[in-house]
Image (cartoon, rainbow, N blue to C red):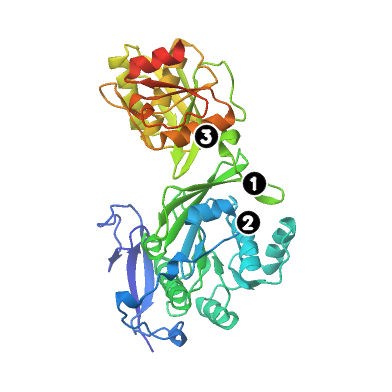
Amino acid sequence: MPKIKTFFQCQTCGYTSPKWLGRCPDCGAWNSLVEEKKETVTRHSSLVSHLGKAEPRSLSSITGEYGQRTSTGIKELDRVLGGGVVAGSVVLIGGDPGIGKSTLLLQTFSGLSKECGKVLYVSGEESPEQIKIRSERLSINSEEIVLLSETSLEAIVNAASKLAPKAIVVDSIQTVYTEELVSAPGSVSQVRDCAAKLMLFAKRSDIPVFLVGHVTKEGAIAGPRVLEHIVDTVLYFEGDRGHSYRILRTVKNRFGSTNEIGIFEMSDSGLLEVENPSELFLLERPLNVSGSTVVASLEGTRPLMVEIQSLVSQTNFGVPRRTTIGVDFNRVNLLVAVLEKRAGLYLGGMDIFVNVVGGLRIIEPAVDLGIITTIASSLKDIPVDPKIFVFGEVGLSGEIRAVTQAEARIKEASKIGFKRAVMPLGNTGKIKNNFGLEVIGIKNVEDCLEAVFT
């Protein structure tokens, strides 16, 4: 009989140790090593043996088949994937429980089944009856969607080999196990090996595979970090329980950009695409109220008009508070220092709270001008004209630096009804069309405050 080898493996980085350690010496995480068991006898898996072994091929003999993409029928998802689903790709989708991952994939497979044919939906957490109830709520009733309630990797691959579907979804990867390992489902070894075998199956058969991944309390996908290295695309489905919209964000994509986002609205009939997210984020914007500024941000190739709010008040403690939601905390502190030094505003004894409305998180430097404007507006208690929007990067000396795709930002603002654009002077000379807006070029922070508040 084969012998069982016991070892300890880090759940964060996959580091292996013969004994338990309180702290992982590789990644430094505490209490992350868990006991694993594995047979010492090496056995070659027969899961993909019927597909044959890979042979060396010259580069010139390989055709660019990855350029052919299949549309999912959901434009927002196609945008995030880079134009559609690539044959043989492996896509990992993570998100909080109940955020809508299964709903999104069921709607995706409804579109793929109409475009391609049979698709296989493997569920390790729900019964086919539960999925049927969800499909009735989404008005999905297709004979091309085949349901399989199974957690054994061998059974899943055998069923997929016989059915030969056009796409496969596994919900979720943490529930799948392979009989070649004796560890429990969801362990580091099981998740890593199952994902690796599914990736090999996808590459050999040219069948795209979608994997659903659980997330930890910190919001990262549960399991070893190597799980994200194995797959081709990593998507995070984000959202706030207090809001009806959801954001699908790309973290890794071997076949497209990692800056694209897809925006959906959750309704009783499923996820609806938001074609004009700028109107959604500005729908409840208060007018003629201090501490509110609209900034033109860029997410991938999509310009977004986002409201940034701030509240500046006299502190009651010895150390003033600084709280930010949706923007980088250190970046806000840097901009506060620029306002004090270059614009002469006293903020050292003030509590400052900055929030990006709608739950968005913006990291591009073009929102610097919006943060400075909204903080100054709240401090002076002077409202910003609701028809004005700003964008631009702020340097430590107070200068306003040019940003990319200024014309696309102006075009987006003109659709919503903005009249004036406060932007870097370096961008004004490169704009060919102002779309009927008054463009105000500024050089430094003082020019910005003068243009906005006069």
Q: Earlier in the sequence, mark 3 or mark 2?
A: 2
- Residue that numbered label 2 is attached to: 103
Depth check: 427 or 220 in front? 427
Depth check: 274 or 175 in front? 274
Disc 3 to disc 2: CB gap under 8 Å: no
Q: Earlier in the sequence, mark 1 or mark 3?
A: 1
> Residue 140's mark?
none
Circle nearer the viewer, 3 or 2: 3
Quarter of the image containing the C terminus?
top left
Q: Taking 209 as reference, is 274 left or right? A: right
The span from disc 3 to disc 2 (Cα, nearest Å) is 30 Å
**Image: 283 above or below 15:** above
Give how far across and how far down residue 135 sits, in percent. Answer: 71, 61
Disc 1 to disc 2: CB gap under 8 Å: yes
Depth check: 21 or 293 in front? 293
The span from disc 1 to disc 3 (Cα, nearest Å) is 24 Å
Q: Amino acid at mark 2?
A: Thr
**Image: 250 above or below 204:** above
- Residue that numbered label 1 is attached to: 266
- Residue that numbered label 3 is attached to: 412
Give how far across and how far down residue 107 sits, in percent. Answer: 64, 58
Q: Local crowd at mark 1 within 10 Å, few (<14), some, or many (≥20)?
A: some
In this view of the protein, can residue 314 be seen by the observer? no
Q: Local crowd at mark 3 within 10 Å, few (<14), some, or many (≥20)?
A: some
